Image (cartoon, helix red, strand yellow):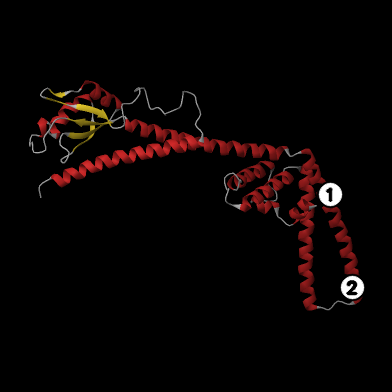
């Protein structure tokens, strides 16, 4: 039997990293730790992961079944004793030369021991076949727990992605562009200096950033600390009566201010991994565009300053 031959070549206790006297609870704990680490779903690029996971499953089946474990321990003990006998025999041969009669007696004794090993092996084969036919409840339960842990880890990663997207969406709602009439050579900048703009806007809430363009006269970008402040300023601020402000959202006016929303999704819908990937890429592009706009206006300010 292929499974039995494979088991005979392995030390199941060493495979799980446990002692020979380990109880079922320790066996299951060791199995979960090692099986989770080498699970094929978590190691798609490792061709040996499936093989090792299968070996760990065999070890759990045998070592958590009393009859199968007893049969395995018997075979394991016989193999260890045979190895010790071989070692002692090799050492003895270096010192003395056995006569023919002694070798024959030893051969007969070895034959009896081989017969006992063969019986133990057949017993182990029968126990493994029984486990295969019955289906190992221990194995099924442990594998169910592993799948549940993998699912929880995947859900945690998805929740992290949702939080990241929500944060990016919220950031989008905080910035807009200001425009007013102003000639390039107008030193008064149409009546709007940075201090004037801050005084007009800060009454709605904290302003995190305000950048005026020196090359493109009559243009500025403002970023508020809260959505509420940005919405109040957008709805109410008109600027100076002699030179009104035109206010526009950087990416179009948001639809509703109750919280971040995701295009094409209704309440209670579930995002697929492809949906998440698309949303992440879209938000990354939008964030990059906002950063480029702010950086460009800051660079224009530096270039427009007298040297």
Question: Which residue shows up at 19% across the image and 31% down it?
Answer: 179
Q: Which residue is mark 1?
A: 123
Q: Give the Cα separation between the discs numbered 1 and 2.
A: 32 Å
In the rendered image, residue 172, in percent from the top left (x then y), is placed at: 32, 32
For label 2, the SS is helix
The answer to whether the residue labelled 1 contacts the one labelled 2, judged by CB atoms less than 8 Å apart, is: no
Q: Choose between 246 and 298: the one closer to the eye.
A: 246
- Is residue 18 visible in the rendered image? The answer is no
Q: Is residue 89 left or right of residue 29?
A: right
In the image, residue 287 sits, relative to residue 77, either above or below, namely above
Location of residue 162 (image quadrant): top left
- Is residue 89 visible in the rendered image? The answer is yes
Q: Choose between 104 and 10: the one closer to the eye.
A: 10
In the rendered image, residue 301, in percent from the top left (x then y), is placed at: 17, 43
In the rendered image, residue 136, in percent from the top left (x then y), is placed at: 74, 39
Query: Closer to the camera: disc 1 or disc 2?
Result: 1
Question: Which residue shows up at 80% across the image and 75% down it?
Answer: 93
Question: Which residue shows up at 85% across the image and 56% down it?
Answer: 118
Location of residue 245 (image quadrant): top left
């Amino acid at each position: 039997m292929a499974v039995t031959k494979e088991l005979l070549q392995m030390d199941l206790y060493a495979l799980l990293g446990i002692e020979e006297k380990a109880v079922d609870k320790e066996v299951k704990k060791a199995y979960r730790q090692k099986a989770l680490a080498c699970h094929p779903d978590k190691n798609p690029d490792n061709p040996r992961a499936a093989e090792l996971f299968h070996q760990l499953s065999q070890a759990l089946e045998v070592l958590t079944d009393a009859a199968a474990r007893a049969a395995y321990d018997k075979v394991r003990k016989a193999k260890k004793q045979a190895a010790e006998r071989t070692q002692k025999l090799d050492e003895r041969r270096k010192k003395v030369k056995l006569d023919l009669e002694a070798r024959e007696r030893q051969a007969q004794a070895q034959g009896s021991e081989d017969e006992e090993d063969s019986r133990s092996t057949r017993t182990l084969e029968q126990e493994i076949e029984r486990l295969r036919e019955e289906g190992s409840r221990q194995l099924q339960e442990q594998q169910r727990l592993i799948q549940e842990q993998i699912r929880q880890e995947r859900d945690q990663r998805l929740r992290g992605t949702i939080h990241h997207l929500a944060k990016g969406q919220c950031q989008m709602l905080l910035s807009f562009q200001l425009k007013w009439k102003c000639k390039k050579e107008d030193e008064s900048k149409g009546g709007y200096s940075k201090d004037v703009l801050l005084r007009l806007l800060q009454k709605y809430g904290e302003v995190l950033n305000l950048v005026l363009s020196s090359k493109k006269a009559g243009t500025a970008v403002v970023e508020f600390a809260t959505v509420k402040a940005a919405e109040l300023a957008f709805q109410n601020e008109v600027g100076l009566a002699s030179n009104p402000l035109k206010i526009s959202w950087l990416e179009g006016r948001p639809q509703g201010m109750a919280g971040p929303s995701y295009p094409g999704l209704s309440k209670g819908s579930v995002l697929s991994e492809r949906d998440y990937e698309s949303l992440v890429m879209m938000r990354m592009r939008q964030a990059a565009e906002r950063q480029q706009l702010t950086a460009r206006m800051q660079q224009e300010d530096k270039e427009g300053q007298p040297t």
